[in-house]
């Protein structure tokens, strides 16, 4: 991978021809991308769980029905039992990776406990699992026209309805996905 070509803090927008059920019509935020590979979180796949169920499983008390009803997303097919909180909070949490322009992903219990008390990040997305690529794998998929890439937009992450994120991310690039062919090929 050439220097300065990291796609950390970029969206991967699945092209309409993507047939992998983990990523079809998906938007994945890359949290890390370097010569060794990439790690990202898909931001528009709803799981069968709510945050309240996660709290219950972790034996964390939560009095807020609004907080308990927040949907948990499927962050990707790798380690689907591991939880991630994507946020823009500058406070120090026990296990946090900071990247991009103020974004962070935390995997520690303390952030969930704060959320249950109404003291967590103002903007947060909770997910289970992540997406991962080995060295060169993502670059090959991009070269095969599987993905569009664009710098991540926090408004899409935190303020756009989950089911609208795929089209909104593409629109931020000036692409109308309904006008893109749902097959790929080479001339």
Image (spheres, rainbow, N blue to C red):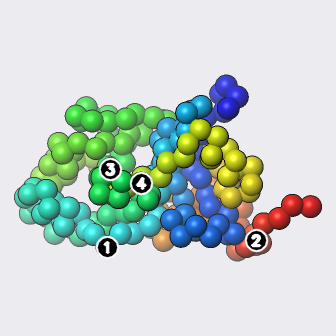
For the point 31% across and 73% down, which residue is it? 48
Residue at 31 percent of width and 42 percent of height: 106
Mark 3: few/some/many CA within 10 Å (<14, 14-19, 20+): many
Q: First in sequence: mark 3 or mark 1?
A: 1
Residue behind mark 1? 48
The answer to whether 7 is drawn above or below residue 179 in the figure is above
Circle 1 residues within 10 Å: few <14, some 14–19, many ≥20: few
Find residue 59 and report its horizontal and vertical position in percent.
8, 57
Of residue 62 and residue 174, the one placed in the foreground of this image is: 62
Q: Earlier in the sequence, mark 3 or mark 4?
A: 4
Which comes before the other along the chain, label 2 or label 3? 3
Left or right: where 56 falls relative to 101: left
Residue 183: mark = 2
Nearer mark to the viewer, of 4 and 1:
4
Residue 17, picture quadrant: bottom right
Between disc 4 and disc 2, the foreground one is 4
Query: Residue furthest toward the right?
Result: 187
Q: Quadrant of residue 168?
A: bottom right
Q: Is residue 41 above or below residue 106?
A: below
| Circle 4 residue | 78
Q: CA distance from mark 1 to mark 2?
A: 30 Å
Q: Marks 4 and 2, Cα distance to the nearest angstrom?
A: 26 Å
Residue at 49 percent of width and 48 percent of height: 132
Q: Is residue 125 visible?
A: no
Residue 163 position, x and y percent, is 48, 71
- Quadrant of the image for the C terminus? bottom right
Residue 39's spot in the image, x, y percent?
A: 48, 44
In space, the residues marked 3 and 1 are separated at their CA atoms by 16 Å
- Mark before the other along the chain sequence, 4 or 1: 1
Q: Residues within 10 Å of mark 4 (few under 14, many from 20)?
A: some
The quarter holding residue 111 reads top left
């Amino acid at each position: 991978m050439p220097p300065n070509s990291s796609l950390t803090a970029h969206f991967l927008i699945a092209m309409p021809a993507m047939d992998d059920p983990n990523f079809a019509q998906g938007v994945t935020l890359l949290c890390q991308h370097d010569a060794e590979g990439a790690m990202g979180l898909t931001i528009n796949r709803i799981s069968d769980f709510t945050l309240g169920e996660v709290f219950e499983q972790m034996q964390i008390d939560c009095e807020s029905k609004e907080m308990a009803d927040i949907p948990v997303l499927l962050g990707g097919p790798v380690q689907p039992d591991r939880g991630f909180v994507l946020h823009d909070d500058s406070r120090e949490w026990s296990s946090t990776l900071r990247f991009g322009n103020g974004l962070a992903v935390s995997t520690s219990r303390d952030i969930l406990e704060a959320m249950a008390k109404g003291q967590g990040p103002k903007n947060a997305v909770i997910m289970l699992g992540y997406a991962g690529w080995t060295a060169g794998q993502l670059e090959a998929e991009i070269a095969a026209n599987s993905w569009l890439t664009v710098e991540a937009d926090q408004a899409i992450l935190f303020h756009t309805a989950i089911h609208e994120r795929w089209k909104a991310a593409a629109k931020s690039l000036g692409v109308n996905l309904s006008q893109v062919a749902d097959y790929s090929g080479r001339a």
